Amino acid sequence: MKAARRPVAALAAALVLASCGSGAQSSAPVPSGPPTNDLRVGLLEYRLALSAGTLTPGSVTITATNAGSTGHDLRLRQGDSVLGATSVLSPGGREVLRVDVQPGEPVRLDCTVGGHVEAGMHATLTVAG
Ligand SMILES: [Cu+2]
């Protein structure tokens, strides 16, 4: 009986497992890149998918899209101020907010549906100074 060894296949399998492991994030990373005044936020169970991690000061357009399968909303706060909030969006729903952000202070994003922040639906954006 031939002992047919497949070292190449075994190595390929190990690489696939390694890349899967490193790609499994428990929380969504905030993207790096230049500041934007046009942010898109995907609402998912249970995380926020952001098109950017840094905002420009001043007027910013936020497009929130419910890409999940249950109701979600999006609220933006800076310090103690609520900058804006969507209604609770049905799956596939979209709402555009125009907010005014101050330089240098982080902006906190939350889904205010019960339990969703605790499940991971929040993020903090920086604002360019
Ligand atoms: Cu939610």
Image: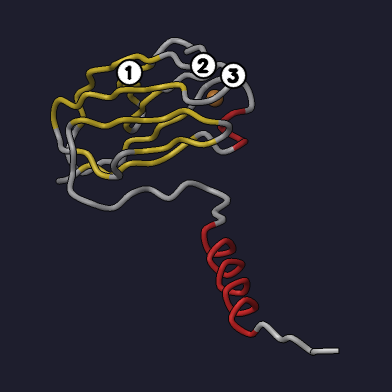
Note whether ligand 1 is within 8 Å of mark 3: yes
Give the residue type at disc 1. Gly
Please name which of the two marks, 1 or 2, marks the residue nearer to the observer.
2
The answer for how far apart the CA atoms under marks 3 and 1 are is: 21 Å
Where is residue 34 shown, x and y percent of the image?
Answer: 18, 48
Of the two numbered discs 3 and 1 on the same chain, state the one appearing first in sequence: 3
Under circle 2, the secondary element is: loop
**Colour convention of the picture:** secondary structure
Where is residue 10 shown, x and y percent of the image?
Answer: 65, 78
Of the two numbered discs 3 and 2 on the same chain, state the one appearing first in sequence: 3
Give the residue type at disc 3. Thr
Under circle 1, the secondary element is: strand
Name the residue that disc number 3 marks. Answer: 70
Mark 1 residue crowding within 10 angstroms, few (<14) / some (14–19) / many (20+): some
Where is residue 101 shown, x and y percent of the image?
Answer: 21, 30
Where is residue 107 shown, x and y percent of the image?
Answer: 32, 36
Under circle 3, the secondary element is: loop
